[in-house]
Image: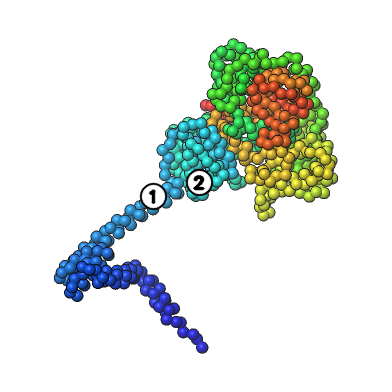
Amino acid sequence: MEQRPGAGARARYWFDTTLARGTSALVGWLVLVCLAVVVPASAALVWTSGHAPATLSGKVAAIWRLTGETMRLGGTTGSPARVALSVLLALVALVYVSTLVGLITTGLTERLIALRRGRSTLLERGHVVVLGWSEQVFTVVGELVAAGANQRRSAVAILADRDKTAMEESLQSKVGPTGRTRLICRSGPSADPAVLALTSPATADSVIVLPPDASRGDADVVKALLALRATARGGEVTVPVVAAVRDSGHLLAARLAAGSRGVVLESDTVTARLIAQAARRPGLSLVHRDLLDFAGDEFYPAAHPSLAGREFGEALLSYGNASAVGLIRGGVPWLNPPAGTVLEPDDQLLVIAADDDTAEFADCAPLVDERLVAGVRPPETRPERLLVLGWNRRAPLVLREWGRNAPPGSVADVVADEDEATVRAACEGGDRDEAGEGGEGGEGSDWTCVALRGDTTRPETLAGLDLASYRSVVVLGQEPRAGEPPEEPDTRTLVTLLVLRHLERRTGRELPVVTELTDDGNRPLAPLGPGADVIISGKLIGLLMAQISQNPHLAAVFDELFSAGGTQLHLRSAADYVLTGHETSFATVVAAARDRGECAIGYRSHAEAHRAPGYGLRLNPPKADRRRWSEGDEVVVVAGEGRRGAVRSGGLPLPRRTPRG
C-alpha cells in the first residue's frame, strides 16, 4: 500500500512551490514573517507599559505607531486615508534607499571583481615588468626582491594569463616576505598589446619575458616581444628587454623582435655549456650559482681615476675587498685582459664585490710573498672518460660542448633508453663540428662517443660499467615521448641517482656526479653528496635573466663566461699557484695567477668541501686573508681554456646581445 506523505512534507512542498513563483512571493513571505514577529512584540510592549492608553482604541493606535516605527512605515494615526498615505510614503522611501544601497553595492562589487581580475592600469615608474608564468618566475621575482632590498621602494609587475589571486598566493608562498618591494599582478595574455599596456612597460626600468613551460613556448615569447613593440612609441622598445628561448630556430626572430636594447638567451645552449663545464671541473656549478644570485658578490663597474696610466696587473692588487676581473672600455666589457694593458682615463674596472659602492681602493702588493709562489707546471693532457646517463634534447649540446675542450683521445659513453642510431647521429654531428668530418663512434676526431642501450634506473645496467674509470658522470632527465603518459619531472633522474649511490657504497669510491634537474623542489630529494654539482636549468636561466635585467652591461660578460671557448671560470689546483703546506695571503694567490695570465677570484677548501652552506667555496675573500694551503684546495680563476690551440670554430651560436643600431 502506497504511503501518503505527512503533513510536514506537504507543508514544505507548498512552501517551496510558493517561493518558486518569483520575487513577489519572496516579498510577501518576508512581510508576513516580519509582521508575525513585530505585531505581537509591539502588543506585548504596549500592554506591559505603565503609560499605556486606557482605552482599547488607544492601545491599538500605540501598537500601530510602534509597528510603523520598527518597520519604517511612518506609523501615522488618524483617518484611513492618512494611514494609507503614510504607508505609501514610507514604502517609496524604503524602495529608494534599498535601490540606492543596491546600486552602490553592485558598483563596489564590480570594482572589486575587476581589481581581483587584475585589469587596472599601473601608474608606476622605474619598476620591472615580468611577462609570462613558469617555474622561473619564482626565481626571477625572488632575485628582484633581493636586488631591491637596499632601495627605498621598488615594484615588480607580473603579467600572465592566470588568475590574479592564484598568482599572488603562489608568489607569497614560494617567494616569502618581499620587504620594500611591492608585487603587482595583472591577469591577461602578454601577447595582447592592450593587456600588455596595463603594466606600463614604457616607464619600466626593464622587461623580462619568461619562456613558458609548454613546447610552443618559444613562439609565445616572440609574440610577447612583438606586443611589446606594438605598445612602444614609434614601434621601437626603449627599455632594456631580457628574454629566453629554448630552440635556436626562434633565436633570430626573438632578437629582431626584442630590438636593439634586447638580450635574448638561448636557454638550452647555456644550460648545456654549464653542464659540460661542470663535468670537466667538478664544483664549478657552485661558483656559477654564487655569482648569479644577488645574495653574495656580483659583477660591478668601478671607476678609480687614480689608476689611469697604470697596468691592469697592478689593478688586480689595488682592492682589498674586491676582485678585478676585467675592464669596461667604450661601454664594452673586456674580461681578463693582458696584465700589461694600460688603463685609460675613461676605462672602468669590472670587479666582483658585495655591492656597487663597497669596493675599497687599497695597495695589496706588500701582502704578496714571492717566496711561496709555485713554479709553472705543465698542463694535464691525459684523455678523460665521461659517462652520460639519460637522454634529452640537450644531450647532443652537452656532448658537443664537453668534446670541444676535452683532451685528445677522450671518450664519452652514453647509456640511455634511446635508439642507438639517434645517439650515434648526435655524436657524429658533434664530431663533424669538432673535426670537420664525421665517422662512426667519433672516428677522425679528438674524442670518441660510444652509445650503449640500457635503462639507467636498473642496477644491472650500471653495474656492468667500470664506474671507477670515469672522471665524471652526467645524469640527464628524460623527457616524455610522444604517445606516452607524462610522468612527474625528475622521477627517473632521482631513481638513477639512488642506483649510483648504491654502487658508490659497493665500490667505495665517490663519483663526481653532475645532475640536471627540472624542478628546484626536487633538489632536497636528490640522493647526492654535499656540494655536488646540480644544474637546475630553469633556475639558472632565471638567475641569469634577473642579473642582466638589473645590469644590462653584464650580458656580454656572461656571454663570454658561458661561451664554448675563450675566457671562462675555472677551478684549478692550488698547487699550481702557491707552495702547499705553507701559510700565505690570498694576495699571493692573486699575484701568482696574474703571472699566468689569469684573475684569481676565490678558492674552495678541500677540508670544508662537504660542509653546508658554502661547501668550502669562498668568492672574493679579502686579499689580507691568510690560510694554510693544502694539496686538495682549488683556486677559482677567470682565464682562457687551458687546452690552447685545440679549440676549433663552429658549434652553436652564443647567446649574444643584439648589436645596437
Q: Residue 612 placed where, x, y %?
A: 68, 36
Q: Residue 526 placed where, x, y %?
A: 70, 44
Residue denoted by label 1: 111
Compare residues 652 and 158 and report the one nearer the observer. Answer: 158
Lower sequence index among marks 2 and 1: 1
Quick check: 642 left or right of 33?
A: right
Quick check: 49 left or right of 577?
A: left
Q: Say if 487 sits above or below 293 in the image.
A: below
Compare residues 514 and 179 and report the one nearer the observer. Answer: 179
Residue 210 is labelled as none
Compare residues 375 and 128 and report the one nearer the observer. Answer: 375
Is residue 500 in sight in this rendering?
yes
Q: Residue 267 placed where, x, y %?
A: 62, 37
Quick check: 210 left or right of 504?
A: left
Q: Secondary structure at mark 1?
A: helix
Q: Is the image coloured rainbow, by chain, by secondary structure, or in one colour?
A: rainbow
Amino acid residing under circle 2: Glu
As drawn, the residue found furthest toward the left would be 79
Q: Residue 628 placed where, x, y %?
A: 74, 23
Residue 168 is labelled as 2
